[in-house]
Image: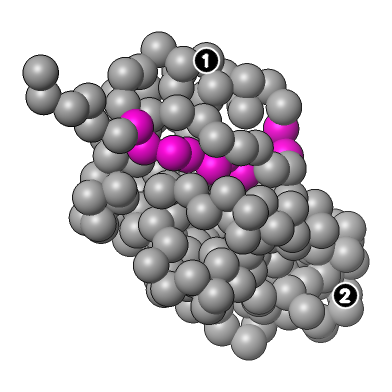
């Protein structure tokens, strides 16, 4: 009888227990993938990677202690052959490019079908680069903000409303709204909170 192919050993990194439980349940139903470990933060992911040396790592981006992109960079610096797939809620092309530049092989949204998620894991194991994220807006977002837009985003991140921002920058509220619209479009963000989260991930807010 031919030898049974070795199963793909997967390390799952996400700070949400329910998400990890869902992925674990999905993996348990497959014949060719097994979950070898779970981490809830970037630093924990690095430590577990050193210990387990998984075939593929499924990495969230926003986590306490250390984010996914920083963890990807650290793991790839120590283990250049590491195969990492990003699993995130953020449909941002700018964030996807940053993750891929850090060394991820694919960028998959948490809303994708289970078949697509498993396909990305198998493709990463084979060394193939996965598809770019599916943006909610269906458009490319390069994440490049003007100096003024970055000022507005920083003030939004500080919890300020449009009227205060207008007074602070000596511009009209309509201009603030125009800047906000541009920020949302460039980042592929759904709302102010989403824009702030993406701004932090992209290093646009200091």
34 drawn magenta: no
* Residue 206 image label: none
Q: Is residue 140 left or right of residue 197?
A: left
The magenta region covers 7-16
Q: Is residue 131 left or right of residue 165?
A: left
Residue 124 on image: x %, y % = 30, 50
Residue placed most toward the observer, 205 or 77:
77
The answer to whether one can see residue 4 in this image is yes
Q: Is residue 46 left or right of residue 115?
A: right
Residue shown at 61%/37% (left/top)? 37
Determine the image quadrant of residue 123: top left
Q: Residues within 10 Å of mark 2 (few under 14, many from 20)?
A: few
Looking at the image, the residue that sits furthest to the left is: 1
Most common SS among magenta residues: strand
Q: Which residue is mark 1?
A: 25
Residue placed most toward the observer, 14 or 30:
30
Residue placed most toward the observer, 53 or 134:
53
Residue 109 on image: x %, y % = 44, 39
Up-down: is 185 above or below 123? below
* Residue 167 image label: 2
Q: Does dot 1 land on a helix, a strand or a loop?
A: helix
Q: CA distance from mark 1 to mark 2?
A: 52 Å
Labels in figure, total: 2
């Amino acid at each position: 009888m031919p030898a049974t192919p070795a199963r793909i050993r997967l390390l799952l990194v996400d700070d949400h227990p329910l998400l990890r439980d869902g992925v674990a349940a999905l993996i348990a139903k497959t014949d060719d993938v097994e979950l070898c470990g779970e981490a809830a933060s970037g630093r924990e992911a690095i430590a577990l990677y050193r210990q387990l040396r998984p075939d593929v790592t499924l990495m969230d981006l926003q986590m306490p202690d250390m984010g996914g992109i920083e963890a990807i960079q650290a793991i790839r610096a120590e283990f250049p052959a590491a195969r990492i797939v990003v699993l995130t809620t953020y449909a941002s092309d700018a964030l996807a490019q940053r993750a891929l530049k850090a060394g991820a092989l694919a960028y998959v949204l948490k809303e994708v079908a289970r078949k697509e998620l498993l396909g990305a894991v198998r493709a990463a194991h084979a060394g193939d680069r996965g598809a770019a994220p599916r943006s909610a807006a269906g458009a490319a977002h390069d994440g490049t903000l003007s100096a003024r837009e970055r000022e507005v985003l920083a003030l939004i991140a500080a919890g300020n409303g449009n009227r205060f921002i207008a007074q602070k920058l000596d511009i009209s509220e309509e201009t603030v709204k125009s800047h906000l619209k541009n920020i949302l479009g460039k980042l592929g963000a759904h709302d102010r909170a989403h824009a702030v989260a993406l701004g932090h991930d992209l290093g646009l807010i200091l």
